[in-house]
Structures are given as structure tokens and as C-alpha cells.
Image: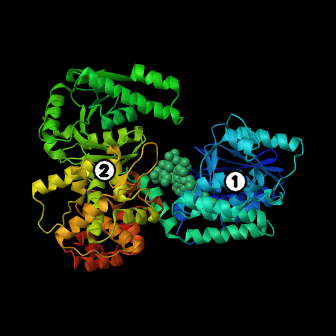
Amino acid sequence: MSQVIEYEKEGDIAVLSANNPPVNALGVEVRRGLMDGIERAETEGVRAVLIYGRGRTYFAGADIREFGKPPQDPWLPAICDRIEASPLLVVSALHGTALGGGLEVALSCHYRIAVPSTKIGLPEVNLGIIPGAGGTQRLPRVAGVTAALDVITTGRHVQAPEALEMGVLDKVQDGDPREIGLAYARELLAVKAPRRPICDMAKPTPIDFDAAYDAVLRKGRGQLSPAIAVRAVQASCEADDFTAGQARERELFTQLMASDQRKGLIHAFFAERAVSKLPELQGVRPRDLHQIGVIGGGTMGAGIATSALLAGLPVLLLEMSSEAASAAQDRIASNLAGAVKRGKLSPDDQADILRNKLSLAVDYDALSGVDLVIEAVFENMEVKKQVFARLDAVCKKGAILATNTSYLDINEIAQSVSRPHDVVGLHFFSPAHVMKLLEIVVADHTSPEVVATGFALGKRLGKVSVRAGVCDGFIGNRILSAYRTCADHMVLDGASPFQIDVALTRFGFAMGPFAMSDLAGLDIGWAARKRKRAAGQDPRARDSIYADKLCEAGHFGQKTGRGYYVYEKGKRGGQPNPDVLPLIEADRAAQGISPRTFSDEEIVRRYMVAMVNEAARVVGDGVARRPLDVDVTLLYGYGFPRYMGGPLKWSDLQGLPNVLDDIRKWSEQDAYFWQPAPLLVKLEAEDRCFDDLNKER
Ligand code: T1G
């Protein structure tokens, strides 16, 4: 008998328990154990079979690590059919997260009981595929098409009470899964409950599947799996019989399993878990965090404070005056009210946080007891150094001194205090209490313990934390600067900002670069361009002034109501600003440029290749430890389409030689901007890809 599926007998009930930590994934050994267990039970004169999971959960799905490898017998659909066809009464007792193939195994049983905290779901679409072991055929039969489509196309987790109402669960009862499962099986046997193979149930009532398909496809913004799932569910109504419906499901599942979107989404799944696993942190104990200090209560400081407060961390917020502190408190209260509105916080908890967890101060001495302090003051090196000097004087030994700067040199800040090993960058993204990305910027002398504490804080705040080295823009903003510059070059050469935005949203980005600039504020880019010019940028670098002209006219984007787009109060989105094209034409004329047309394909290709080239430099320079760190940064901080896995996964799927061919071709027009990143050239020469680097590091 397999170790991962244990077989026991409890009277006239055979018990199959999964023991495959951490999530009882349905790997080939588990599948073999289930098949052997069912067959054995049928030879031992028992009347029922109970299936449940040991440890933290019932089966949480197929083993994702097997994807992309040759499938191994027995396949999960065959297991489900075998369980369902058993002449014995088969009961599943669920707890934890019964997801994907796990729920499909449960649906192939004849009865399902769960503890109240159980969550069920069919989240396969989040991996670029669809349920492939009968879920699209069985769930509609028990829950109806509408409920099944909601669960399958969103991949959402369903709490036990709702699953009971849906008809997916037959009973919800507190207790040990094994015990409640055995009691329920005995109860069913006592009343001679019939087997209830779902495959024998009537076909579900159809809906307008074309309308459902169109609606889901639009919502998917380029991701195909949710819409394809609609067609699989459609087969549960329209196929000749259950078996034909399963065949249709298998056909669609197999198509998606071979797709780049499945490769991208699986990469994202594992990358977002690997990103916090750094060899340098193995065995390093983070410092305890009982209270954190935040300096500066503007948008960022208030957002950071809100994020910590929502995670249950007491916060001391320091401002320059009591009026500023009170204004900061109002910003935090407003942020918390948003959390209440979104159902993330109860009104009582909001009141408790403001009354008991948030303290305000105007005197640095108040920070003497905090374990970690984050400054979010004006982005100016001298101001930052003054703040750090004060912190160095008042904070207790072992307190961590963090800066939220988005581009200033953290090594220079660290050198201005007596404890550089306690200095770290914690780069939050605005709004800090909503955006999940946190760049943990490690300066030359930052101690591993401080880095580990940064990651522990990020985990506690529910962030996805990425380790970054010190450079202008760290990982995300440095890469953003490159592909944003590429977009500006295309505007100078003939494309319009509006065409570029449309092309990139069609490709899958939530927003195009110019709409994004309007959202962030055009003054930020303007300051960066002035900073680079003042620092003396390379004369070979192309420059543009059309955007400066917009800013000089006071148009900073959404915050002033006008930028690349014109924004009307109360209306979502903006309309192209008619003043923009004349500014661009003047800029082209001043530079003697004759504009040409761009196809959407070329726009997307240049934009993406510029992103990949700079990302390869960021990895090559060691600012990002691995390619996956770049991918996770772009996925969580820059609206990169998740189904492509991130820019470096995308480039692997495109083929690095093809990417390099484009760079070399374009470098004939602009050898300065299109210099191939050395790492790209190296990988091409060694016939390797970024995934190989991820595996090595
Ligand atoms: N396969 C392999 N490993 C898995 C896994 C899975 N399905 N789920 C989790 N892990 C690993 C994960 O990589 C991590 O490893 C550890 O378990 C803890 O996970 C035919 C084909 C279950 C809600 O999509 O949603 O069934 O980093 O950190 O936050 O139709 O994991 O420790 O080395 O996420 O408590 C469908 C995916 C598969 C569920 C737990 N199932 N997993 O969250 O822990 S497709 C899923 C999750 C399928 C069938 C199809 C979550 C979780 P490590 P964790 P967590």
C-alpha cells in the first residue's frame, strides 16, 4: 500500500487517508494509492469507503509540478470515474482547501461532508487551464450552470456554508474530518442511502453560452482559460451524454495545457512563492516587531501606516506639527474607511485601530521605543540624511531604520548614520495599503537579520516582497524608465501616445504607459528628466521636450485634470488631450524627425523588448537576484499581464535569439538605446534561457 494514501478498515467502512504534505497534492503516487484503495475495498466485503486528508487539508488539487511533463497513469479523470462507479458507498470528508482536482475527487464521491472552515473551488483558470477531471461536467449537475460558471470562471474559493447551499456539500459539521466522515458514512448506511453518481444526474439547464463566453472573454483581458471553461460547461448541457461531455472537457483542457498562458501562469504561481526564499536568509532569525514608527503622514506615509495597522501592528506616526499629524490621521481614517467599505474591516475594528493602535507625535523622542521606523518624507537626499541623523540619535539599539525612497542612493543614506547595518530600503508602491509589491532594498552594509526582518514585515503586511539591490530605480522603476523611454521614442518617430496606450491594453496591460503617467503624476517623470539632464546624461541619449511643455503648462495628469488625457469630474478614464499632438509635432520638427506609421504589433514588440533588455541588465548587475524576482516585481507592481508570467518568462517563451535579433536590428537606428544586455548575449551564446538561471540560483 502506498505511503501517501493509507488504507484502514473501521468495521464495514474502508478508510483511505491522504498523507502527502504540504497540501495533499494529487501526484501520481496519491492517484495510484486511491485507485488501489478503491479496488482493495471492493474485495474486502466492506459497505462504504471514506476518503479524507491528513494534515492541513483535503486534496488541494493536481500536483502542479507535474505540469508540462508526460502525464503518468493513472490519470485523475480515470480515478474519479472509478470512484464514482464503485458499487460501495463512497463518502468524502473535507477540510482545509478542497481545490481543483481535489474537489473533482470529492464530486466523484457519492456524498460530501465538510468542517465549517473548509473552502472548495476550481481555480484551474488561474493556472491557465480548466478543470480536467470532470469538474466542468459534475459541478453544473449539482449546482446548476450559473453557479458553476461563477465558481469555475473566477476560480474563487467558496466557503462551506455557501457550498452547502449550492448543493456541493451535503453536510457541514464541526469536528475531526475522519470522525465526522465515519459518523456520516454510518448514518448513510443505517438509512440505506443510495449511491448518487453525479454522472447519472440529469443534464443541467442551459443558458445563453455565447453571451456568457463573450462576457467572460472581455473580462479576461487577454487570458483565455475562463472563456474556454464556458465552452466546457456548455458541453455538460449539450453533449450527447456525460462521457461525451468529459471528452469535450479533456479536449479543451489539453489545448490549454499546451498553451503559453499555462506556462506563464504556472511560472507566476511558483515565482511568487520562490521570491521570498533566498539562500542568504536561510537560518536567519528576523528581529521581533511590536511597534513601528512612520515618519511623514503624506499619501505614502499614511498608506504605509494603514497597511501596518490593518496587519495589527501598532504604529507611531511622526509629523512636523500637530496640524500635519491630524491631517495624516484623517488620511489613515479615510484609508480604513475604504477597508470597511470593501468588507476587509469591521467598523468596530476601525474605531479600535484609530483609538488604540495609532499614536501621533511631533517629537522624535517619541520614537525611542519602536522596533522599526520607515521614513516617507520628501524625496531629497539632504532631507533624508537629516531625518536619519535624528533617528540614529533617538532610536533604541537594534531598531531598524528604513527608507521608502523610490530612487535615492540608500548606501549614501546608510553612510550618514552610525549603524549602517540597520539601514534598509522598504519601497512601497502607492497606494501602499493596497498595492502588494514591496521592494526590500539591501544596501552594502545591511545585515541579513535586517533583510530577514524586512521580509517578515512584508509577509505580515500581506505583501509580495522582492529583494533588490541599490541602483537608480531599484528593480521596477529602473525597468519602467527603459520601456517608458522606448514609448517616448516611438512617439517622436510617429506613433501617438493614444495609439500606444490602446496597443498595450489590447496586449494585456491594465493601463498603457501614458495613462499610467497621468495617474502617477507627470511631474514625477518631469523631475526625473530634469535630474538626469542636470547629472549630465549621455549626449547619444535621445531626449524629448513635448512632455515638459505639458508640465510647464501645469498639466500633471489626473491630479490636475489634464495631462495626456483630459479628465472630467465623476467620469472614469479620460479623453485624449487635443493639446498633446501639436506639442509632439513641434518637438519632431525641432529635431528634424519625419514621422512614420507604427503597427500595434511593432509598438508592443519594441515596448516589451525594451523591458526585457533592461530587465536582463538588472539581473546581470545583481540588482535582482534571479529573473523570477524581476517577473514578480512587474506582475505585482506594474500591471504586467499575469498570464505571460512576467517579462523574462515572456522572453523565454518568445525565444531569446528572436529578442536579440530585434535589438540588433533596431540598434542600427539607435545604437545607444538598443545596446544588447550582456546577460542576454551570454545566455544566447550558451543556448540557455532565464528559466535555467532561476533553477540555478
Ligand atoms: N501542487 C503542487 N504544489 C503545491 C500545490 C499544488 N497543487 N499547491 C500548493 N503547493 C505547494 C506550494 O508551492 C508551496 O510549496 C506549498 O505547497 C504551500 O503552498 C485536474 C489539473 C492550497 C490555497 O490551483 O492555491 O487540479 O513553497 O505557500 O498560502 O482539474 O497553495 O512550500 O515549496 O500556497 O497556505 C488546482 C494551488 C491545481 C491550488 C495553500 N489547485 N494552491 O495556500 O500555502 S490544477 C490549485 C493554492 C488541477 C485538475 C487540475 C495554495 C493553497 P513551497 P502555499 P498557502
x and y percentages locating residue 613 in the rendered image: 28, 67
Q: Secondary structure at mark 2?
A: strand
Residue at image coords 24%, 31%: 399
Quadrant of the rendering where the C terminus is positioned: bottom left
The residue under the point 21% across, 62% down is 544
Judging depth in this view, the residue of 232 and 330 nearest the camera is 330
Looking at the image, tell me whether mark 2 or mark 1 is earlier in sequence order. Answer: 1
Instruction: Say which mark, if any, is on residue 382.
Output: none
- SS assignment at label 1: helix
Near-viewer residue (406 or 443): 406
Residue 612: image location, x then y, percent: 32, 66
Q: Is residue 446 above or below residue 129?
A: above
- Work out whether 154 lies above or below 589: above
Residue holding disc 2: 467
Residue 62 appears in the figure:
no
Q: Residues within 10 Å of mark 1 (few under 14, many from 20)?
A: many
Q: Is residue 151 visible?
A: yes
Q: Is residue 664 left or right of residue 505?
A: left
Report the coloring of the rendering: rainbow
